[in-house]
Image (tube, rainbow, N blue to C red):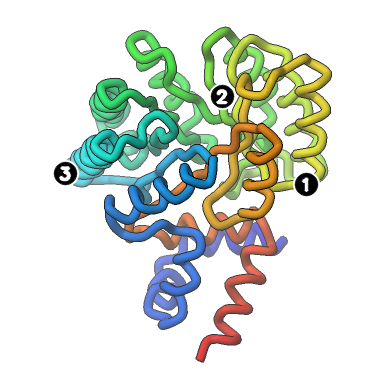
Amino acid sequence: MLGRVLLGASRSQRLRSVVEKAPVSRGVVARFIAGDTTADAVRVTRELINANLTVTIDHLGEDTLDRAQADAVTTEYLGLLAALKDHGLTDRAEVSVKLTAVGQALPGHGEKIALENARQICQAAADAGTTVTLDMEDHTTTDSTLSILQDLREDFPSTGAVLQAYLYRTEEDCRALASAGSRVRLCKGAYNEPASVAYQDTRDVDRSFVRCMKILLAGEGYPMLATHDPRLIEIAGSLAARFRREPGTYEYQMLYGSRPTEQLRLAQAGETVRVYVPYGDDWYGYMMRRMAERPANLQFFLRAIATKK
Protein backbone atom coordinates (compact mmCIF):
# COMPACT_ATOMS: atom_id res chain seq x y z
CA MET A 1 0.00 0.00 0.00
CA LEU A 2 2.82 2.42 0.90
CA GLY A 3 4.50 1.70 -2.40
CA ARG A 4 1.34 2.59 -4.32
CA VAL A 5 0.99 5.86 -2.41
CA LEU A 6 4.56 6.80 -3.26
CA LEU A 7 4.15 5.85 -6.91
CA GLY A 8 1.10 8.08 -7.06
CA ALA A 9 3.07 10.86 -5.37
CA SER A 10 5.72 10.62 -8.08
CA ARG A 11 3.16 12.22 -10.44
CA SER A 12 2.01 14.93 -8.00
CA GLN A 13 3.16 18.40 -9.04
CA ARG A 14 2.06 19.92 -5.71
CA LEU A 15 4.09 17.44 -3.64
CA ARG A 16 7.01 17.81 -6.02
CA SER A 17 7.06 21.56 -5.37
CA VAL A 18 7.04 21.01 -1.59
CA VAL A 19 9.84 18.44 -1.66
CA GLU A 20 12.05 20.41 -4.05
CA LYS A 21 11.82 23.49 -1.84
CA ALA A 22 12.63 21.64 1.39
CA PRO A 23 16.16 22.60 2.55
CA VAL A 24 16.99 18.99 3.44
CA SER A 25 16.05 17.50 0.09
CA ARG A 26 19.24 18.20 -1.83
CA GLY A 27 21.44 16.72 0.89
CA VAL A 28 19.45 13.51 1.00
CA VAL A 29 19.19 13.28 -2.76
CA ALA A 30 22.99 13.43 -3.04
CA ARG A 31 23.14 9.84 -1.77
CA PHE A 32 21.17 8.59 -4.76
CA ILE A 33 21.88 11.16 -7.51
CA ALA A 34 25.39 11.86 -8.83
CA GLY A 35 24.67 15.57 -9.24
CA ASP A 36 23.28 18.02 -11.76
CA THR A 37 26.00 18.09 -14.40
CA THR A 38 27.95 15.92 -16.80
CA ALA A 39 31.05 16.62 -14.72
CA ASP A 40 29.28 15.17 -11.68
CA ALA A 41 28.35 12.02 -13.61
CA VAL A 42 31.93 11.59 -14.84
CA ARG A 43 33.34 12.08 -11.32
CA VAL A 44 31.06 9.48 -9.74
CA THR A 45 31.65 7.07 -12.62
CA ARG A 46 35.40 7.27 -12.11
CA GLU A 47 35.00 6.66 -8.36
CA LEU A 48 32.88 3.56 -8.95
CA ILE A 49 35.19 2.16 -11.63
CA ASN A 50 38.14 2.65 -9.28
CA ALA A 51 36.21 0.48 -6.80
CA ASN A 52 36.05 -2.34 -9.41
CA LEU A 53 32.43 -1.64 -10.34
CA THR A 54 30.93 -0.96 -13.76
CA VAL A 55 28.42 1.78 -14.49
CA THR A 56 25.37 2.73 -16.53
CA ILE A 57 24.43 6.43 -16.51
CA ASP A 58 20.95 7.90 -16.82
CA HIS A 59 20.27 11.58 -17.54
CA LEU A 60 17.11 12.17 -15.52
CA GLY A 61 13.93 13.21 -17.27
CA GLU A 62 10.94 11.59 -18.94
CA ASP A 63 7.52 12.33 -20.44
CA THR A 64 8.99 14.94 -22.77
CA LEU A 65 6.15 16.66 -24.67
CA ASP A 66 8.25 19.20 -26.54
CA ARG A 67 10.47 18.45 -29.55
CA ALA A 68 13.08 20.98 -28.48
CA GLN A 69 13.37 19.33 -25.08
CA ALA A 70 13.70 15.88 -26.67
CA ASP A 71 16.51 17.18 -28.86
CA ALA A 72 18.16 18.85 -25.86
CA VAL A 73 18.18 15.56 -23.95
CA THR A 74 19.73 13.87 -26.97
CA THR A 75 22.43 16.54 -27.11
CA GLU A 76 23.08 16.02 -23.40
CA TYR A 77 23.73 12.33 -23.99
CA LEU A 78 26.07 13.08 -26.88
CA GLY A 79 28.05 15.38 -24.61
CA LEU A 80 28.07 12.80 -21.82
CA LEU A 81 29.42 10.09 -24.12
CA ALA A 82 32.12 12.43 -25.44
CA ALA A 83 33.15 13.24 -21.86
CA LEU A 84 33.28 9.57 -20.89
CA LYS A 85 35.47 8.86 -23.91
CA ASP A 86 37.76 11.80 -23.15
CA HIS A 87 38.26 10.49 -19.61
CA GLY A 88 38.91 6.93 -20.74
CA LEU A 89 35.87 5.47 -18.96
CA THR A 90 33.88 3.87 -21.77
CA ASP A 91 35.40 0.41 -21.34
CA ARG A 92 33.43 0.07 -18.09
CA ALA A 93 30.62 2.61 -18.46
CA GLU A 94 27.57 2.73 -20.73
CA VAL A 95 24.41 4.88 -20.77
CA SER A 96 20.74 4.19 -20.11
CA VAL A 97 18.10 6.11 -22.06
CA LYS A 98 14.38 6.59 -21.44
CA LEU A 99 12.69 6.86 -24.80
CA THR A 100 10.01 9.20 -23.45
CA ALA A 101 12.84 11.63 -22.67
CA VAL A 102 13.88 11.72 -26.32
CA GLY A 103 10.42 12.11 -27.83
CA GLN A 104 8.48 8.83 -27.66
CA ALA A 105 5.36 10.48 -26.21
CA LEU A 106 5.28 13.40 -28.65
CA PRO A 107 2.01 13.61 -30.58
CA GLY A 108 2.03 12.47 -34.16
CA HIS A 109 5.45 11.05 -34.92
CA GLY A 110 6.79 10.57 -31.40
CA GLU A 111 8.00 7.02 -31.96
CA LYS A 112 9.86 8.02 -35.11
CA ILE A 113 11.46 11.00 -33.36
CA ALA A 114 12.52 8.83 -30.43
CA LEU A 115 14.05 6.30 -32.81
CA GLU A 116 15.99 9.01 -34.63
CA ASN A 117 17.30 10.50 -31.39
CA ALA A 118 18.12 7.09 -29.91
CA ARG A 119 19.97 6.22 -33.09
CA GLN A 120 22.16 9.31 -32.67
CA ILE A 121 22.93 8.29 -29.10
CA CYS A 122 23.71 4.70 -30.10
CA GLN A 123 26.06 5.91 -32.83
CA ALA A 124 27.85 8.21 -30.39
CA ALA A 125 28.14 5.32 -27.93
CA ALA A 126 29.57 3.03 -30.61
CA ASP A 127 32.06 5.74 -31.63
CA ALA A 128 33.08 6.09 -27.98
CA GLY A 129 33.52 2.34 -27.54
CA THR A 130 30.49 1.61 -25.39
CA THR A 131 26.76 0.93 -25.75
CA VAL A 132 23.23 1.92 -24.72
CA THR A 133 20.44 0.28 -22.74
CA LEU A 134 16.85 1.40 -23.35
CA ASP A 135 15.09 1.85 -20.03
CA MET A 136 11.56 0.46 -19.81
CA GLU A 137 8.78 2.67 -18.49
CA ASP A 138 5.07 2.11 -17.81
CA HIS A 139 3.28 -0.70 -19.65
CA THR A 140 1.70 1.59 -22.25
CA THR A 141 5.17 2.12 -23.78
CA THR A 142 6.35 -1.51 -23.76
CA ASP A 143 5.42 -2.49 -27.33
CA SER A 144 6.77 0.78 -28.73
CA THR A 145 10.03 0.44 -26.79
CA LEU A 146 10.59 -3.13 -27.94
CA SER A 147 9.84 -2.10 -31.54
CA ILE A 148 12.42 0.69 -31.36
CA LEU A 149 14.88 -1.76 -29.76
CA GLN A 150 14.46 -4.13 -32.69
CA ASP A 151 15.14 -1.33 -35.17
CA LEU A 152 18.22 -0.14 -33.29
CA ARG A 153 19.67 -3.63 -32.99
CA GLU A 154 19.89 -3.90 -36.77
CA ASP A 155 22.79 -1.43 -36.67
CA PHE A 156 23.69 -1.57 -32.96
CA PRO A 157 23.22 -5.20 -31.87
CA SER A 158 24.57 -4.60 -28.36
CA THR A 159 21.73 -2.21 -27.47
CA GLY A 160 20.31 -3.43 -24.19
CA ALA A 161 16.69 -4.16 -23.33
CA VAL A 162 14.92 -3.84 -19.99
CA LEU A 163 12.10 -6.14 -18.90
CA GLN A 164 9.96 -5.74 -15.79
CA ALA A 165 9.04 -8.85 -13.80
CA TYR A 166 5.79 -7.43 -12.45
CA LEU A 167 4.16 -7.50 -15.90
CA TYR A 168 2.33 -10.71 -16.83
CA ARG A 169 3.82 -10.62 -20.32
CA THR A 170 7.46 -10.54 -19.24
CA GLU A 171 8.18 -14.28 -19.21
CA GLU A 172 7.26 -14.44 -22.89
CA ASP A 173 9.33 -11.34 -23.62
CA CYS A 174 12.29 -13.00 -21.87
CA ARG A 175 11.96 -16.02 -24.14
CA ALA A 176 11.91 -13.77 -27.20
CA LEU A 177 14.99 -11.82 -26.11
CA ALA A 178 17.17 -14.58 -24.62
CA SER A 179 19.14 -14.99 -27.85
CA ALA A 180 22.87 -14.88 -28.48
CA GLY A 181 24.36 -11.42 -27.96
CA SER A 182 21.15 -10.01 -26.46
CA ARG A 183 21.71 -7.87 -23.38
CA VAL A 184 18.62 -7.90 -21.13
CA ARG A 185 18.23 -6.13 -17.81
CA LEU A 186 15.60 -7.79 -15.62
CA CYS A 187 14.11 -5.63 -12.87
CA LYS A 188 10.98 -5.85 -10.74
CA GLY A 189 9.37 -2.68 -12.12
CA ALA A 190 8.79 0.74 -10.60
CA TYR A 191 5.54 2.12 -12.02
CA ASN A 192 2.00 2.04 -10.63
CA GLU A 193 0.47 -0.58 -12.95
CA PRO A 194 -3.11 -1.89 -12.90
CA ALA A 195 -4.03 -5.46 -11.97
CA SER A 196 -5.09 -6.06 -15.56
CA VAL A 197 -1.44 -6.11 -16.69
CA ALA A 198 0.74 -6.57 -13.60
CA TYR A 199 1.10 -8.63 -10.44
CA GLN A 200 0.02 -6.65 -7.38
CA ASP A 201 1.43 -8.84 -4.60
CA THR A 202 5.18 -8.49 -3.99
CA ARG A 203 5.47 -12.27 -3.54
CA ASP A 204 4.02 -12.82 -7.00
CA VAL A 205 6.47 -10.28 -8.44
CA ASP A 206 9.36 -12.11 -6.76
CA ARG A 207 8.19 -15.45 -8.16
CA SER A 208 7.96 -13.94 -11.61
CA PHE A 209 11.46 -12.49 -11.23
CA VAL A 210 12.82 -15.96 -10.46
CA ARG A 211 11.01 -17.54 -13.41
CA CYS A 212 12.36 -14.84 -15.71
CA MET A 213 15.89 -15.28 -14.35
CA LYS A 214 15.69 -18.97 -15.19
CA ILE A 215 14.72 -18.19 -18.78
CA LEU A 216 17.47 -15.61 -19.25
CA LEU A 217 20.23 -17.62 -17.56
CA ALA A 218 19.28 -20.73 -19.54
CA GLY A 219 19.38 -18.75 -22.78
CA GLU A 220 22.27 -17.59 -24.94
CA GLY A 221 22.06 -13.88 -24.15
CA TYR A 222 23.68 -11.71 -21.49
CA PRO A 223 21.38 -11.34 -18.46
CA MET A 224 21.66 -8.22 -16.31
CA LEU A 225 19.95 -8.99 -13.00
CA ALA A 226 18.79 -5.77 -11.37
CA THR A 227 17.84 -6.38 -7.75
CA HIS A 228 18.87 -5.38 -4.24
CA ASP A 229 16.91 -8.21 -2.62
CA PRO A 230 19.35 -10.48 -0.71
CA ARG A 231 17.18 -13.54 -1.28
CA LEU A 232 16.91 -12.94 -5.03
CA ILE A 233 20.66 -12.34 -5.26
CA GLU A 234 21.26 -15.67 -3.54
CA ILE A 235 18.83 -17.41 -5.90
CA ALA A 236 20.52 -15.74 -8.88
CA GLY A 237 23.88 -17.14 -7.78
CA SER A 238 22.42 -20.63 -7.45
CA LEU A 239 20.77 -20.42 -10.87
CA ALA A 240 23.98 -19.16 -12.48
CA ALA A 241 25.77 -22.20 -11.09
CA ARG A 242 22.97 -24.54 -12.23
CA PHE A 243 23.17 -23.22 -15.78
CA ARG A 244 26.99 -23.23 -15.65
CA ARG A 245 27.24 -19.51 -16.14
CA GLU A 246 30.77 -18.23 -15.62
CA PRO A 247 31.32 -14.78 -14.06
CA GLY A 248 31.35 -12.27 -16.88
CA THR A 249 28.58 -14.00 -18.83
CA TYR A 250 25.95 -12.18 -16.74
CA GLU A 251 25.96 -9.31 -14.28
CA TYR A 252 24.21 -7.87 -11.26
CA GLN A 253 22.87 -4.33 -11.36
CA MET A 254 22.07 -2.04 -8.44
CA LEU A 255 21.14 1.60 -7.98
CA TYR A 256 23.67 4.21 -6.96
CA GLY A 257 23.39 4.69 -3.20
CA SER A 258 21.51 1.43 -2.57
CA ARG A 259 23.38 -1.35 -0.74
CA PRO A 260 26.87 -0.09 -1.65
CA THR A 261 28.51 -2.60 0.70
CA GLU A 262 26.78 -5.46 -1.11
CA GLN A 263 27.88 -4.04 -4.45
CA LEU A 264 31.50 -4.16 -3.30
CA ARG A 265 31.11 -7.63 -1.77
CA LEU A 266 29.84 -9.10 -5.02
CA ALA A 267 32.55 -7.36 -7.04
CA GLN A 268 35.24 -8.65 -4.67
CA ALA A 269 33.81 -12.16 -5.12
CA GLY A 270 34.52 -11.88 -8.84
CA GLU A 271 31.04 -10.90 -10.03
CA THR A 272 30.35 -8.12 -12.52
CA VAL A 273 28.32 -5.43 -10.75
CA ARG A 274 26.95 -2.47 -12.69
CA VAL A 275 25.77 0.59 -10.78
CA TYR A 276 22.89 2.63 -12.22
CA VAL A 277 23.97 6.25 -11.81
CA PRO A 278 21.37 8.99 -12.43
CA TYR A 279 22.26 12.66 -12.75
CA GLY A 280 20.50 15.88 -13.64
CA ASP A 281 18.15 18.29 -11.89
CA ASP A 282 14.90 16.47 -12.78
CA TRP A 283 15.23 14.05 -9.87
CA TYR A 284 11.83 14.12 -8.13
CA GLY A 285 10.00 11.33 -10.00
CA TYR A 286 13.06 9.10 -9.88
CA MET A 287 13.46 9.51 -6.12
CA MET A 288 9.81 8.79 -5.37
CA ARG A 289 9.90 5.56 -7.39
CA ARG A 290 13.10 4.48 -5.64
CA MET A 291 11.41 4.93 -2.26
CA ALA A 292 8.38 3.00 -3.47
CA GLU A 293 10.61 0.13 -4.57
CA ARG A 294 12.50 -0.17 -1.31
CA PRO A 295 11.04 0.97 2.04
CA ALA A 296 14.58 1.30 3.46
CA ASN A 297 15.12 4.22 1.09
CA LEU A 298 12.04 5.99 2.51
CA GLN A 299 13.28 5.33 6.05
CA PHE A 300 16.62 6.87 5.13
CA PHE A 301 14.89 9.93 3.68
CA LEU A 302 12.63 10.46 6.70
CA ARG A 303 15.49 9.88 9.15
CA ALA A 304 17.57 12.50 7.35
CA ILE A 305 14.74 15.02 7.55
CA ALA A 306 14.18 14.31 11.25
CA THR A 307 17.85 14.73 12.18
CA LYS A 308 18.73 17.65 9.88
CA LYS A 309 19.77 20.72 11.85
Task: Rate crowding at label 3 as few (under 14), some (14 to 19) or many (20 or more) other CA atoms within 10 Å.
Answer: few
Image position of 23 (left or right of 124): right
Around disc 1, counting alpha carbons within 10 Å, would you say few (fewer than 14), some (14 to 19), or many (20 or more)? Answer: few
Residue 70 seen? no
Residue 107: name its quadrant. top left
Residue 230 - label:
1
The one nearer the camera, 74 or 113, is 74
Residue 190 on image: x %, y %:
58, 47
Q: Nearer the viewer, mark 1 or mark 2?
A: 1
N-terminal of the two: label 1 or label 2? 2
Q: Nearer the viewer, mark 1 or mark 3?
A: 1
Query: Mark 1 belongs to which amino acid?
Result: Pro
Write the residue at 66% across / 18% down. 172
SS of the residue at dot 3?
helix
Kind of residue sitting beneath label 2: Val
| Residue situated in front as seen by the camera: 51 or 202 | 51
Q: Residue at the spot x=63%, y=46% of the render?
A: 263
Gap between marks 1 and 2 measured at Cα: 21 Å
Residue beneath disc 3: 68
| Residue 85 located left or right of residue 32 | left
Alpha carbon distance from label 3 to label 2? 30 Å
Q: Is residue 210 left or right of residue 216?
A: right
For mark 2, what is the residue? 184
Residue 228 in view of the camera: yes
Say which amino acid is labelled 3: Ala
> Between marks 1 and 3, how big is the CA–CA gap?
42 Å
Q: Position of residue 121 (x, y in %)?
A: 28, 29
Against 176, residue 286 (above or below) is below
